[in-house]
Image (cartoon, grey):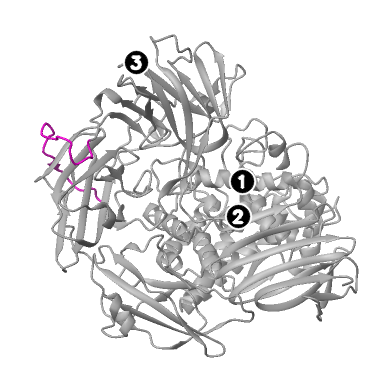
Amino acid sequence: MRLRINNYYSPFGIDTGVPLFGWQLDSEERDQCQSHYRIIFAEREVSLERCEDLLWDSGKVYSSEQFGIGYQGQPLKSVTTYYWSVAVWNQHGEMSWSDPISLFTGYLYEEAWKAKWVGDGGAKPFYARMRFAAKGKVKRAYALVSGLGHFKLYMNGEKVGPGEMDPGWTNYNKSVQYVCFDVTNHIRDGNNVIGLSVGNGFYLGDAGDRHFYTLDKGYESYGSELLAIGEWHIEYEDGSMQHVRTECENWRVRESATTLANVYGSENFDARLYPAGWYDLSYDDSSWEIPKILTPPKGKLVSQNQPPITVKTTYDTIKIEEPKDQVYVFDLGQNMSGMFEIYVSGPAGSKVTIKPGELRNEDATVATPWDIVTYSEYTLAGSGEVEVWKPDFSCYGARWVQIEGCTRDESNTSKPFIHDVKGHFVTSASMDAGHFETDDPRINKLAQIIIKAIESNLQSVHSDCPTIEKLGWIETASLMGPSIMFVKDVEALWLKITRDMIEAQTEEGLIPDIAPEYSKFSEGFRDSIAWGSAIILVPELLLKWYGNRTAMVEAYPAMKAYMRYLKSKEVEGGLINHGLGDWGIMPQSGGDYIENVETAFYYECYKRLSHFATMLGLDHDAAHYASEAERVKVVYNAKLLRWIPDEGRYAYCRRNGEFDPLNQVIQAIPLSFELVDENYRSDVEASLLNAAAGRQFKSGEIGLRYLFHALAGMKRNDIIFDMMMQPEHPSYIRFVEKGETALPEFWTDNARSRNHDMMGHILEWLYRELLGISSIADAYKEINISPLYLDSVQDIKGSYQSARGLIDVHFSYDEAGSRLSVSIPPNTTALVKIPLLSSGNDLYENGQKVDYKQVSEQGKHYAVTSIHSGAYKFHTGDL
């Protein structure tokens, strides 16, 4: 049994008085389900063992629920360690206990931190350090730390934790995240030292002389000084406590050797200024200054609930070129969101320029989109040894790293010698959730390049790209959410994104297209429903995939305010005619079909909000929003559904009546959102099939997911497959054939960004339709297993780590018959649809003939049967 606290990546720093408990069940036996559970909770582990002095005992609860179970015990205390355990009974009354696990609370209520915000009073990066003496044998110790914009924590000569660029980006006027570290093993007997290194981030942005995307779009710093805060709570074996805090006394500060920390990927570092060993105990800090107590940021300190950003993989150079004299291009083989590390030696004061990029010019030098100026500079200390450096406070999207100001000629001692470059791929530490492969290596490569783009953009927000913008454009959180959730566990991160949207909401109720909103764009780039609807659609995804109700509850007032705002923007009694429409419908261009797209999302928002209101017991709200949805649906069809004489059927058109027979999206979206009355469905489906007859995409990022959804709903996955495999753009396989290692932004060989995941919706289709895993109900408590039978793919296998456990599928076929191996976790059931090579084939499971229901789709036959938890091996045809 695997236990977890829902809504938090880590059990350390839980900053709610009502934690939500969840668990996954393990069993190799078939037909296992949970009939009861019992949760016990205490301040001492021994109390769990003895079942005494408990702060909460749920008692034996008749329920099959596995997550989102709220604490109902005695009030919890801040910065305190607790323990909990779960007992589960199966349907036969057999009981088993989990191992006990601990959690550590952050600040739960309105208590003020005892620590102070400190710094050197400047706007440039700084170091801070202090010594303290441990007072005995440490039982456990936790540190609660924040530094704005970013910080690194060191203790006794070692970096603490794997995180890069902590804390997460937020609206610092509303909330500021702190990180809770378990530092038990970092404290030594006797004297100890703590070090903090602080850089700018988005809190106090520093462009230097380089690219900073938001500066001309209204960016304003949140403060005038970089600053840090920290508390160390140390419990000794004898029960005594010690608290170490940031303050003036005993702390010292000095300027950093990082002289520029530009969050857009540019850093300057002067190794001559670096105080080597500054976070070691033996370092002499007598020349350092006493820190200043600084004005705190406006935002409330909250625990960093989402996963930290960490180095997932380190890539070595695979090729070195010299396109110009003493200009070296290091190929790392993978486009990534990277921190690029150089190995260099040479004279003191000499300077190396590092230019990462994901594009190359005709002369093979590194290029940047829009010729933006992004580079880092490293000034050598001249130690006589190989000097190693990588950025501390920024990352950038690149495959190639261009090094200037160096030589590869060992006889030239007048310049630095560049030995090597490595790429540290940084991404959210969200756990991997999926695996997928087929017998076609091109499809496998396609899945991989989409995943690399996802990983490059999973940071503390879902960014649009790691190069140009880095901003949290929120439409991808809802539109790409299902694709991402098949390969990553993003429950905690998507909750953080929901909170970002709540904090970004304006007084008028607008949910802007970007959250946190570090700059204010205009028109559709700030106010487009396909973006703003994420305030409703992201909580819906969290509910469907993880059974998470927190986002829905917290965001419900913001949802209502947003719908009031949208209603004020209606035209013609229910249409919306502002926004971007289907953005990116042609390569590197804007959107189109605004009323069709935006109004459909408007309807969908009302419909989903009505459902949420029902779940929350708000019957009046539910009825109101259902009525509003129906009103918009009537107007949508009255204004946009027209008889097309040349086609001899009804179809959706522009508001002015113009009909484009090749447009797929304006038919697919109303089909997906169930806006089409049954009397007209066959006409609209025929129009969609006609628009897709060429088997090529004509869709931007907004409509693409719904194009796949509509065609799959019509059982025309063959069309989607052919679209995916087109040799020329628009095409996914074209990207594979062109050697891309991450997904580009638009359907072209020359996209301005080569690391966007916004067009990656085919990944959801690969898992949901080709591999055949989906949820029927209740966050994968009822599972659908339905691999696709295609002539061109004969072997498909993969898995998905759902909120309830691992789902595994392997389907293959040959002339002898089809085979399907499937396993589903305890406490779930599945409806299994197994392809038959011909009608009436016998179906066997582990050699035993089983009954089934036969269904036919598009001339192909399937056997349908139901199973409970466990592993199964099905075979059709002869034994």
Residue 599 is situated, as x and y percent measured from the top left of the image, at 60, 56
**CA distance separating discs 3 and 2:** 47 Å
Count of labels in the image: 3
Q: Is residue 223 visible?
A: yes
**Which quadrant does the C terminus fall into?**
bottom right
Say what amino acid the circle numbered 2 marks. Answer: Ser
Residue pointed to by mark 3: 350
Q: Which mark is residue 483?
A: 2
Residues tagged 3 and 2 counted as in contact (Cβ below 8 A): no
**CA distance separating discs 1 and 2:** 9 Å
The numbered mark, 3 or 2, whose residue comes first in the sequence reads 3
The magenta-colored residue range is 278-298
Q: Residues within 10 Å of mark 3 (few under 14, many from 20)?
A: some
The secondary structure type at the circle numbered 2 is: helix
Q: Nearer the viewer, residue 562 or 154?
A: 154
Picture quadrant where residue 260 is located:
top left
